[in-house]
Amino acid sequence: MSEPILEMRGVEKRFGGVRAIDEFSLKVEPGMVYGLIGPNGAGKTTIFNTITGIYHVDAGKILFQGKDITKVEPHQAARLGIARTFQNIRLFGNLSVKSNVEISCNMNAGYHLGDALLRTPRYRRVTKETEERAMEFLKIVGLADKGEERASSLPYGHQRKLEIARAMATNPKLLLLDEPAAGMNADESLELVEFIRELKERFQITILMIEHHMDVVTSLCDACTVLNFGKTLAAGTVEEIKKNPEVIAAYLGGDE
Amino acid sequence: MKILIQQIITGISIGSVYALIASGYALVYSLLDFSNWAHGEVCMLGAYVCFMATTVNNMPYWLSCVLGIGGAAVISFLNEKIAYRKIRNNGSPNMFLMIAAMGLSTTYQNLANVIWGSKFKQLPKIFSVGTINFDGIYIGTTDMLCLGLSAVALVILLLIINKSKFGLHVRAVACSSRTAGLLGVKIDRVIAVVFMLAGALAGLAGIMYGMKYNIYPTMGNVGLKAFIASVIGGLGSVPGAIAGAVLLGLIETVVSGYISSGLRDLISFCLLILILLVRPSGLFGVDVQEKA
């Protein structure tokens, strides 16, 4: 077995007296699509927030490619190669579709304020490269013709895709998707499954996703963890999970 | 008619000085959602730095101006670095930032009073001729200088915000700093540079204010005018703040010219209240709720 790309060891996060996640451990191998499922309020998004440095954990360790990232800040996590999308889409609504992607593209663009003011050749070159890269990602998600529109004016499905394009433009090794199929019907989620598969093949990334649509999870995920009240209820392949009586009880509501 | 044209040009000129302060104020507001009440004092301190350099240390005027602008940028940066950053990062409500800014404002005013005294100081004029006669319309040379320099500074600012990578980051952080951070934007650095830019503009404004009028410890109250201008144009919008500032300068000049200069501030503040009551999103309307 190769070294896990992401590993969480005994992670705990409290909000006041509430343990949002408790003794949570996880191992994601490179190239996997890993599912994180569980009822609302189980702590799934909190896990994403700890990985990306929005929250700092109260106990435990998080390793990314063997490197301790327990205490990194969000922009450092991004630079290490972790990108994410949000459950409730968070685009820069006032900015154009293209600008949204350009922000991620030029994370490492090399020119100074002086270059920008004087419009030096270097500035023009870097700007052109950034633009081309942004357009490339927009093409992949099928939004190339919408580059100049305001992000907030796009229909919901397109906003989701734009958010994924924006995350991909940071050149991630690990992509965290928070309920990518939320609010989609069966056809749309099928399309999404294809799209995510394509992304994974093309960019050789590892994906950790939170999802409620079991058909999406079944067709995409190599393994998954089921959470309930911040604790791991079960972990394994999708087939194993589906048969697990505790999981069925948590989802369907067992006898009280 | 000629008098009216004269008034209008004077109005735009003082409006352009307000615009320098208001645009910095609006930039900070757009990023951090708080009213930086110490911004006017940065402007005052910039003016004093320039004054000390030129009259006390006999440095060349251009160098004194550069020092004044640079000094204001450094003070603005330190305000953020020492006071605001800590408050931002320890999860306090935004109200605390505003209160810290008020504290800084009072501290700087009193400090200036202790160091330089409350007496009015004046920066030397650059031109020996006070006014130029354009076919019966008399325009102050200082007015023209203010207008020209402000216009250049503001155009550069708008270019930076709208055309550069840094500007894109500023706009992204204004939209959602958390999301921008997750995409690799170094938020603290963006904010620090914005404070420096805002400080430099305020320093330039302070110097020009000192050339046109006087320098005194409470001159930072001109920051209130920048606040009014910003509200007129829509809080958090830089182009709005510039337009609001020019409009405010015009209204003030016309009121002092045709009604009474004693009523000038009264009218300005009535305008503020009126806008807040009737059109809180400002004339150029960034949606207030969206921003808050």
Image (spheres, coloured by chain):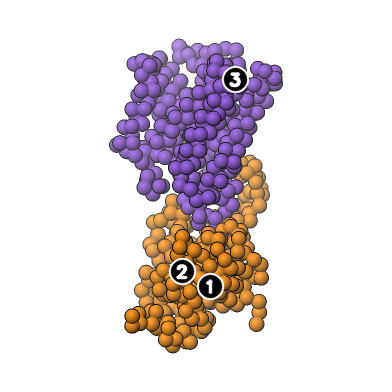
Disc 1 chain ID: A
Residue contact between numbered discs 3 and 1, judged by CB atoms under 8 Å = no
Report the Cα–Cα distance between label 3 and label 1: 61 Å
Of residues A222 and A103, the one nearer the viewer is: A222
Residue A11 coordinates in the image, percent (x, y): 55, 69
Which labelled disc corresponds to residue A24? Answer: 1
Q: Which residue is mark 2?
A: A43
| Quadrant including the N terminus of chain B | top left
Query: Few, some or many C-alpha atoms within 10 Å of disc 2 (few <14, some 14-19, many ≥20)?
Result: many
Q: Colour of chain A?
A: orange
The mark lying in front, picked from 3 and 1, is 1
Q: Tell me residue A147's x, y (percent).
A: 47, 57
Residue type beneath disc 2: Gly
CB under 8 Å between discs 1 and 2:
yes
- The x and y percentages for residue B38 are 51, 33
Label drawn at residue B116? 3
Q: According to the rendering, which colour does chain B have?
A: purple
Instruction: Identify which residue is drawn at 47% across, 30% down.
Output: B223
When the figure is inspected, residue A144 is found, relative to residue B4, above or below; the finding is below
Residue A229 left/right relative to A71:
left
Residue A130 against residue B121 in the figure, above or below: below
> What residue lies at 43% left-to-right and 61% top-to-bottom?
A89
